[in-house]
């Protein structure tokens, strides 16, 4: 019984460690993005939470680079959604929902069609459209402490 409890504690701790990435310096960003990609499994929709300046856009840009996007990767702040094509011909969608005033605006851009397309979707400021997100959306939290970023997947 005690052994089972210890195994459960170890498994929970290991799951937490395996789903956490620490970025101490900008030079670590490519390896952090590769680590993130390895943890994506079969998921396609990722909701990035973090305060302004936490590094959501920078991290998503590097993930896209590591996924083989050669084109210029920019923040979709004004367009709301950018589409990138990887070297494999796969579409990747990058959303920035910060400027959305209400969920109807997300409906207007066809957000649900993107989310259920099976293509990768990286969403900044998902708090504004949480009711539209698929149940299997992976929540990604980026926190900053002493100039280090911690990326946690849930």
Image: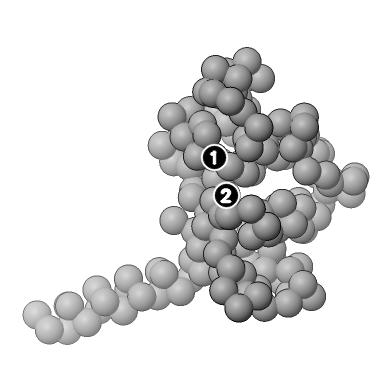
133 sits left or right of 51 in the view: left
Label disc, if present, on residue 48 of the rendered structure: 2
**Label 1 environment density (alpha carbons within 10 Å; few <14, some 14–19, many ≥20):** many
Q: Which residue is mark 1?
A: 126
| Viewer can see residue 42 | no
Mark 2 or mark 1: name the one nearer the start of the chain: 2
129 vs 113: above or below: below
Expressed as whole percent of the image width and height from the top left, the position of residue 68 reads 81, 52
The residue at the point 80 percent across, 39 percent down is 84
Expressed as whole percent of the image width and height from the top left, the position of residue 29 reads 73, 69
Quarter of the view holding residue 37: bottom right
Q: The residue tagged with tag 2: helix, strand or loop?
A: strand
**Label 2 environment density (alpha carbons within 10 Å; few <14, some 14–19, many ≥20):** many
79 vs 51: above or below: above
Q: The residue tagged with tag 1: helix, strand or loop?
A: helix
The residue at the point 32 percent across, 71 percent down is 12
Which residue extends farthest right? 71
Quarter of the view holding residue 99: top right
81 vs 120: above or below: above
| Viewer can see residue 106 | yes
Which residue extends farthest left? 1
Front residue of this view, candidates 147 and 30: 147
Quadrant containing the N terminus is: bottom left
Callout 2–callout 1 Cβ contact below 8 Å: yes
Expressed as whole percent of the image width and height from the top left, the position of residue 3 reads 17, 84
Front residue of this view, candidates 135 and 105: 105
Expressed as whole percent of the image width and height from the top left, the position of residue 75 reads 78, 43
The residue at the point 57 percent across, 31 percent down is 115
154 sits left or right of 79 in the view: left
For the residues labelled 2 and 1, the Cα–Cα distance comes to 7 Å
């Amino acid at each position: 019984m005690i052994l089972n409890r210890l195994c459960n504690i170890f498994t929970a701790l290991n799951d937490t460690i395996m789903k956490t990435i620490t970025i101490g310096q900008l030079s670590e960003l490519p390896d952090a993005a590769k680590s993130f990609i390895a943890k994506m499994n079969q998921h396609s929709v990722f909701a990035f939470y973090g305060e302004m300046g936490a590094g959501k856009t920078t991290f998503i840009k590097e993930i896209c680079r590591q996924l083989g996007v050669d084109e210029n990767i920019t923040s979709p702040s004004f367009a709301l959604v950018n589409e990138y094509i990887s070297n494999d011909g796969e579409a990747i969608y990058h959303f920035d929902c910060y400027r959305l005033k209400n969920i109807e605006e997300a409906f207007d851009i066809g957000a649900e069609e993107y989310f259920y397309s099976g293509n990768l979707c990286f969403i900044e400021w998902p708090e504004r459209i949480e009711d539209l997100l698929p149940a299997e959306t992976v929540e990604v939290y980026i926190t900053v402490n002493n100039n280090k970023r911690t990326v946690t997947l849930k």
